[in-house]
Image (cartoon, rainbow, N blue to C red):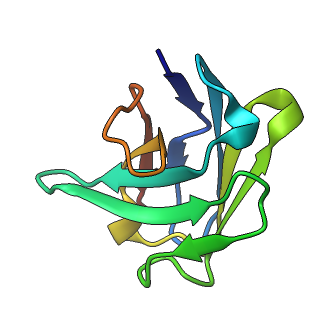
Amino acid sequence: QAHFVESGGGLVQPGGSLRLSCLVSGLTFSNTPMSWVRQAPGKGIEWISYISSDSGATNYADSVKGRFTISRDNAANTLYLQMTSLKAEDTAVYYCTKAGSTTRGQGTQVIVSS
């Protein structure tokens, strides 16, 4: 069974940056397209980014396009999300998932506030 451990969240000022990581086990990571999703307080799950298994294709929600970058290290079974120019509306719990799946880990909290 797939297992996801997200890390790297925290409190950051508007305009700041964070890099999230997700260590994946229980599946063949190098063959698995992955996504990041988030859930803001009181809201539903929002898909924000996708990456193909070989990193050849990426996609982003309009809300984060140009500010967030998804990447992966297949040798380390790790997915990343580099977040820059953070805004208050980016405050959420961030999760990595197998693309198209609803299975998630515990997530990592990101709070953007001055």
Relative height, residue 81 to residue 20 (above, below): below
Q: Is residue 76 left or right of residue 69?
A: right
Q: Quadrant of the C terminus?
A: bottom left
Q: Is residue 80 in sight in this rendering?
A: yes
Q: Is residue 95 left or right of residue 71?
A: left
Residue nearest the viewer, comparing 1 with 85: 1
Toward the left, the furthest residue is 42
Where residue 47 sits: x, y (%)?
37, 62
Position in image of residue 109 (x %, y %): 42, 39
Q: To which quarter of the image does residue 31 belong? A: top right
Q: Residue at x 33, y 69 (%)?
A: 89
Residue beneath the point at 50% across and 46% down = 11
Q: Position of residue 76 (x, y in %)?
A: 83, 29
Q: Splitting the image into 4 quarters, where does residue 45 fall?
A: bottom left
On screen, residue 48 versus residue 81, left or right, reads left
- Which percent across, then down, holds residue 30? 76, 38
x 57%, y 74%: residue:
59
Q: Residue at x 55, y 24 (%)?
A: 5
Looking at this view, is 68 or 11 the one in front?
68
Count of numbered circles on the image:
0
Q: In this view, which residue lies farthest toward the right?
A: 75
Task: Determine whether 88 is above or below 54 in the image.
Answer: below
Task: Say whether residue 68 is visible.
Answer: no
